[in-house]
Image (cartoon, coloured by chain):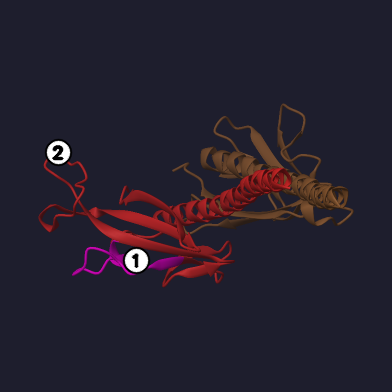
Chain colours: A brown, B red
């Protein structure tokens, strides 16, 4: 009789332990995914707003998906999307990816808004999704980044 | 039998604690994500109003007029895009605005300065500085709030 009780209890413990291990692995993956998506949105936003504030002007070659800024020293810095990755490129350097291979950037939009005649602001919006070809719920995470920065070159 | 019950109880308590820790981490990650989004929106309001200040005349259609003469603080405002121009211009409209599940509001307050031209913590109408406005941007969601404060001046 006692052996049956022991086996029963042991089975329950093993079952609960298995569920717990699976759940904790999924939860840890979900945490990593959320963190990666968030940091891949935050870093480009910080970089782009900093460069916009420091810029002398917005180049007329800029489009809704490609921002080109003229810096104080007369050189140019560009931000654009290629193969779902956000890139930064300065004149003298090779292009640099601002987002990791694990995420994809969508719906990048730069909108120039100019209440005054000389100092426009740029509204930036894009979405960062975690790459999830198998559509598993623990790898589903998205961040919609929207902000604006104004030039300070008075 | 009693030993088994004790072991089971210990295991249940240990699992519950670990489940609690992971659940808490998930909750914190969600909060960080939402706070990041709210910060971006608050920053956007700051920059938009700064651009609005630069493109308007302080005394005629600028920020000076957004706090009623008889009041020290304005009603909430929000930014709108005036698409009748190319590129569009910023405009300020009354009321708050909802973006996803976040609510954004901009409030302007009058500012006073002491004899050394320092901003006084509590507004004193005798020392009113008509060329400075305090701007408070709040983004709220589910009882939480991101608040940014800055001072904008009639610098031209």
| As drawn, A34 above or below B143 | above
From the image, state whether disc 2 or disc 1 is nearer to you.
Answer: 2
- Residue B92 vs residue A52: left or right? left
Q: Is residue B94 magenta?
A: no
Q: CA distance from mark 2 to mark 1?
A: 29 Å
| As drawn, A44 above or below B35 | above
Residue depicted at 41% across the width and 53% down the height: B147
Residue depicted at 42% across the width and 58% down the height: B138
- Residue A71, located in which quarter of the rendered image? top right
**Residue matched to label 1:** B61
What are the residue bounds of the magenta stretch?
B64-78
* Proximity of marks 2 and 1: CB atoms separated by less than 8 Å: no
Q: Inspect this view and state whether residue A93 appears.
A: yes
Q: Main secondary structure of the magenta part?
A: loop
Counting from the top left corner in percent of width and height, residue A64 is at 69, 56
Residue depicted at 71% across the width and 31% down the height: A91
- Foreground of the two, A64 or B93: B93
- Foreground of the two, A20 or A3: A3
Mark seen at residue B116? 2
């Amino acid at each position: 009789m006692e052996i049956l009780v022991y086996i029963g209890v042991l089975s329950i413990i093993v079952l609960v332990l298995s569920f717990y291990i699976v759940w904790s692995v999924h939860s840890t993956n979900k945490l990593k995914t959320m963190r990666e998506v968030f940091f891949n949105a935050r870093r480009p936003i910080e970089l782009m707003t900093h460069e916009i504030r420091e810029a002398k002007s917005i180049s007329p070659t800029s489009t809704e998906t490609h921002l080109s800024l003229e810096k104080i020293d007369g050189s140019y810095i560009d931000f654009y999307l290629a193969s779902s990755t956000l890139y930064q490129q300065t004149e003298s350097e090779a292009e640099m990816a601002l987002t990791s291979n694990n995420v994809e950037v969508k719906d990048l939009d730069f909108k120039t808004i100019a209440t005054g005649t000389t100092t426009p602001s740029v509204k930036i919006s894009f979405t960062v999704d975690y790459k999830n070809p198998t559509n598993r719920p623990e790898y589903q995470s998205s961040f919609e980044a929207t902000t604006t920065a104004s030039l300070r070159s008075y | 039998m009693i030993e088994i019950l004790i072991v089971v109880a210990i295991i249940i308590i240990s699992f519950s604690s670990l489940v609690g820790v992971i659940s808490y981490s998930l909750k914190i990650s969600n909060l960080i994500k939402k706070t990041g989004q709210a910060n971006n929106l608050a920053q956007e309001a700051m920059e938009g109003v700064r651009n609005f200040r630069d493109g308007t005349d302080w005394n005629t259609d600028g920020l000076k007029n957004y706090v009623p003469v008889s009041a020290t603080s304005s009603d909430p405002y929000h930014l709108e895009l005036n698409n009748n121009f190319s590129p569009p211009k910023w405009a300020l409209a009354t009321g708050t605005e909802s973006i996803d599940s976040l609510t954004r509001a901009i409030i302007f307050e009058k500012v006073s300065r002491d004899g050394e031209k320092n901003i006084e913590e509590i507004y004193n109408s005798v020392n009113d500085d008509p060329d400075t406005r305090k701007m408070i941007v709040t983004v709220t969601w589910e009882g939480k709030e991101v608040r940014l404060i800055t001072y904008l001046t009639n610098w031209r």
